[in-house]
Amino acid sequence: MFKKTIEYADKVIVPDEEVKKNLSNYISQNRIEVINYGVDFSMYRKYKYEADENNYDIIYAGSALERKGVKYLLEAIPSIKKQFPVKLHLLSNGYKIEEYKKISKDLDIAENVVFHGILERDKYLKLLSNSRLLCLPTLSEGYSWTILDALCLGVPVVTTTECRCNELFENGDIGFRVKPGDSDVLSDVILKLFSDFELCKKFSENSLKKREEFDYEKIIPKYIELYEKYI
């Protein structure tokens, strides 16, 4: 059904080149139009990256599912804890929460992990903007709106190569992408960001420059032009 649907389409709109590459297995590339997702900057304007060199807070925002790789982030905390008073904020719900609590207790990091559940958007953005970094240790991920939130606030990002967000990292790094399922690698890059606040500020500046590409005011006219051409 999917194949038949796109075969009849004059144009197929995708958010990035990676999706375009995948769809080109079904239809010609000249029928695929890349238009980034857009964001409403009014949601972000009252917040900014507030972390300082003494801030060692990490945010994870997402579902409590196996494929999200949170277990590896939790397993990275003990080695980080040895050097910094780390605080991991889990904004999450799902069937893995009780397991995460048990892991935290078993690793003796319960005092370093805060379980928030799902926050209202304003509270979430405030907490995110007041954290040193966002970590999404995913084992499998499509386009990540969570990373786009961090980018729009100027919050450095740690994620994996399984997060399909290549274009968010192009033209100016916004953080680190590491191999999935490796707590040692996660702890290494988090320690690097905790040890080098100038690097955090660089990633933050790159993010704030890049976010202009996702402004609704630039994205909407592209849709309108395409619709007027084919409808």
Image (spheres, helix red, strand yellow):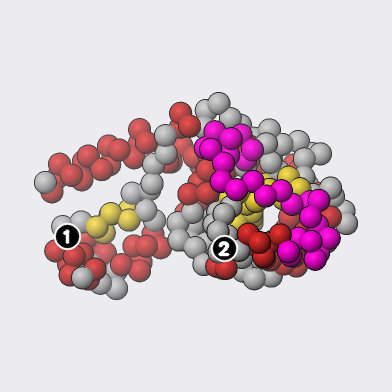
Give the image location of residue 206, x and y in percent: 59, 42
Packing grade of label 2 (10 A; few <14, some 14-19, many >=20) is: few
Q: Quadrant of residue 69?
A: bottom right
**Could you tell whether 10 is left or right of 65 in the image?**
left
Whichever of labels 2 and 1 marks the residue nearer the N terminus, that label is 1
Disc 2 designates what residue?
Answer: 95
Identify the residue at image location x=46%, y=28%. Answer: 42
Instruction: Say left or right for 114 vs 11.
Output: right
Q: Which residue is mark 1?
A: 9
**Viewer-proximal residue among 46 and 164:** 46
Part of the protein shown in magenta: 102-128
Residue 219 drawn above or below residue 45: below
Give the amino acid type for the residue marked by disc 2 in the picture. Answer: Tyr
Mark 2–mark 1 Cα distance, whole angstroms, equals 39 Å
Kindly check if marks 2 and 1 are in contact, taking CB atoms under 8 A apart as contact: no
Badge number at residue 174: none
The residue at the far right in this view is 82
Nearest the eye: 43 or 224: 43
Q: Is residue 223 visible?
A: yes
Left or right: 62, with 156 as reference point = left
Question: What residue is at 74 percent from the left and 65 percent from the top?
Answer: 103
